[in-house]
Image: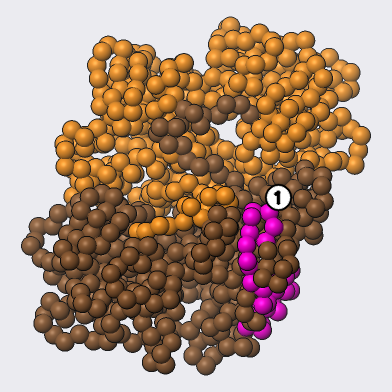
Chain colours: A brown, B orange
Amino acid sequence: MKTFPSSFPHVVVVGAGFGGLRAARRLAGLPVRVTVIDRNNYHLFQPLLYQVASAGLSAGDIAFPVRSALRRQRNAGFLLAEVQQVDLTNRRLLTSAGEVEYDFLILAVGGQTHFFGQESLARHAFGLKTLADADGIRNHVLSLFERASHESDPQRRAAMLTFVVAGGGPSGVETAGALAELIRLGLSRDFPNLDVSGSRVVLLEAADHLLPAMPPDLQAAAEKVLRAKGVEVRLGARVDAYDGQVIELANGEKLPARTLIWAAGIRAVELVQNLPVEHGTGGRVRVLPTLQLPGFPEVFVIGDAALLEDERGKPLPMVAPVAMQQADTAVENLGRLLRGQPLQPFHYRDPGMLATIGRNQAVAQIGRLHLRGFIAWLMWVVVHVFQLIGIRNRLVVMINWVWDYFLYERALRLIQSPPSTSRLSGQEAPQAR
Amino acid sequence: MKTFPSSFPHVVVVGAGFGGLRAARRLAGLPVRVTVIDRNNYHLFQPLLYQVASAGLSAGDIAFPVRSALRRQRNAGFLLAEVQQVDLTNRRLLTSAGEVEYDFLILAVGGQTHFFGQESLARHAFGLKTLADADGIRNHVLSLFERASHESDPQRRAAMLTFVVAGGGPSGVETAGALAELIRLGLSRDFPNLDVSGSRVVLLEAADHLLPAMPPDLQAAAEKVLRAKGVEVRLGARVDAYDGQVIELANGEKLPARTLIWAAGIRAVELVQNLPVEHGTGGRVRVLPTLQLPGFPEVFVIGDAALLEDERGKPLPMVAPVAMQQADTAVENLGRLLRGQPLQPFHYRDPGMLATIGRNQAVAQIGRLHLRGFIAWLMWVVVHVFQLIGIRNRLVVMINWVWDYFLYERALRLIQSPPSTSRLSGQEAPQAR
């Protein structure tokens, strides 16, 4: 692990997502040494994960090495490790790379897919939270088209070409829209002899409207655009079980489909659920208004892992702006602790909401302003592309988009095998083709 | 499988590499229906595979979907399948997607890594023939740097940072040069507290010179450039065994290293080795000068799978230009068969040889012209970039290179987990971090 020349207090930031990376960078201004720990060596730009799943972008376009992001910051180092346990009493972490002691801890570990304890879903449905999820979905969808192209049984073929997304939040809406366009604009040309019109993209939402956090007019607009793109929107539809072949809905209906993408819930990771403190819905840790862990003033919890209510008593949403603003407040309060000043409570400044539906439509709510259509989509592009860390990523993402937009030539429709490993490379070597 | 409106003869092309894809495209002009079969849905631009292994390019930059390449060709379809057996007598293929009958067959299945029967190598060394190999090497090398950054034992750390490439042909030379630059220019900045000068890139070659097919002055030039880039070139060094920890050389020397990349041999794939005909070195099939399989005039074998001597009795090399020129001759002869004309023998027009050594040096031999240094590298860039199929790939590859060249900001240094699979996605979901 990196050692620093000073005897400054050691701040450990767990998680290199939006919250963790922002906190690490802000800590550059304090007299501390910083270690960022993540189980991946990259920061993942989660809002564009659905683009990797739908073959629009490749992993390298939305993932950025943490070490590059921290390179110019003298007081920060990185440790690639999985944190297995937080020992709050002794102020240390048990990790896959050994023990790490801390003076201050910022927990920014994010969330994971929540299958609500339904074992059949956890086993057969895809989550959409990690690069492995996204690569898996892309491989799976493209492989099904290949298999369907020489499947003679019409019922089996129909099930192969039925792609179901559960969850009508921004992630589910974006994924369903992107899949519909991948099929309609991309795969229909790749498979001229396959009746692609037999394929379906179905979006299931348990409530009676999409995008629950959006105002009703934009909810309706999103639904209309999705339907126009060929997505079957099913409201009031709750998934009971899935065996990899047939989705069972709560009303008894059976939907044969080889693909279920689960975008219907996020919960805290086990590391957070196991903390010996009070938890709220989804296993999130209830924090003080200062973002400190009750009873442990040296520990801050931010982002999806933390549960805090807004002025109206509503839990803050699990979105990037909350995590990033909380990073600012946590670092500010950490500095105040060092200087012996009183801490400040967190106040969320809501920047609004954006959800894109395919490559030229979106809905956006910014304060009282409601936008839809192409204008909202342009705003979405600008906001997301410029949020991406690193000019190089921005350039490649923009070229991919421009290319996509004009030619719909998705050269990323690759079905990739898992990487060889040292131990297995010989066994996995090509045997024949 | 694609069905065609005509009752034209069915030509099956197995393999979508340089030879197979070229043959398929040339067949556009003949009154036949064409099916290309490959176990991957993409054409792999193998000459740049070492760039993916050394984190310079991503998979999407060097792989291009076969269906996109064939989209405008009315008489051609694609089948994603692994060919398990060629039934020459009944003119049919047994594949993972069922039986496929043919009237004419073009076998262009390429080669695979040849470990010369050394089980320990096959088990512990990386080949460099597939995208999975390249992704595996990149993950492995970057992970070793991460582990070395918190390894306290100096001997273990040294073994982690010793990267050995076996084989002094173009592939080995390019890989060793690219790894040395990745470490010296990229990782040294990512790991400021790790003594990167303790890392080694070792190139082992059994003969007493590199690049055996090159003239002696270029062999010497390549060796000099590699050494200047920090590669330890060891000539007359033959690998006996490798257990994943220590490489044993034929002279008894032991070289502790966690990484061995095997670029020392290519042989025919099992499908070709199992054909009931005469085989040459490396299991290649001995073909007639017309590229037909002896006794089976409807079967052509081209590229790495085929063995044919040049005018001086030397076997033609296993390189892309041979495969592509043989594709032209095979299709020409297939057309002559259809028209009842006499067939023509294959003549190889040697376009010369190119090998790059890092990002600004190369050696090239074109007829009597011998080039080295930056000029040769520029030629290498132009030749390879413009050979890439598809404008999009070209654009992205060029941007990556320009970026690399000026800033050495390798944003692709990602350690990626294997993609989730439908069955396992739940189990592979994040458990903690």
Name the amino acid, label 1: Phe
Q: Residue at x 60, y 21 (%)?
A: B270
- The quadrant the C terminus of chain A occupies is top right
Residue nearer the viewer, B60 or B181: B60
**Residue A338 seen in this snapshot:** yes
User: For residue A253, which quarter of the picture?
Assistant: bottom right
The x, y position of residue A107, in whole percent, is 29, 68
Relative height, residue A135 to residue B76 (above, below): below
Relative height, residue A148 to residue B169 (above, below): below
The x, y position of residue B350, in whole percent, is 58, 21
Residue with the mark numbered 1: A145
Helix, strand or loop under label 1: helix
Chain for disc number 1: A
Local crowd at mark 1 within 10 Å, few (<14), some, or many (≥20)? Answer: many
**Residue B134 seen in this snapshot:** no
User: For residue B316, which quarter of the picture?
Assistant: top right
B53 vs A157, left or right, is left
Residue nearer the viewer, B131 or A16: A16
Q: Which residues are magenta?
A: A219-247
Q: Residue at x 44, y 79 (%)?
A: A317
Is residue A273 highlighted in magenta? no
The x, y position of residue A424, in whole percent, is 44, 32
Q: Residue at x 40, y 68 (%)?
A: A268
Is residue A228 highlighted in magenta? yes
The x, y position of residue B337, in whole percent, is 84, 20
Residue nearer the viewer, A260 or A387: A260
Relative height, residue A82 to residue B118 (above, below): below
> In the orientation shown, which residue stands out farthest toward the top?
B313
A209 vs A424, left or right, is right
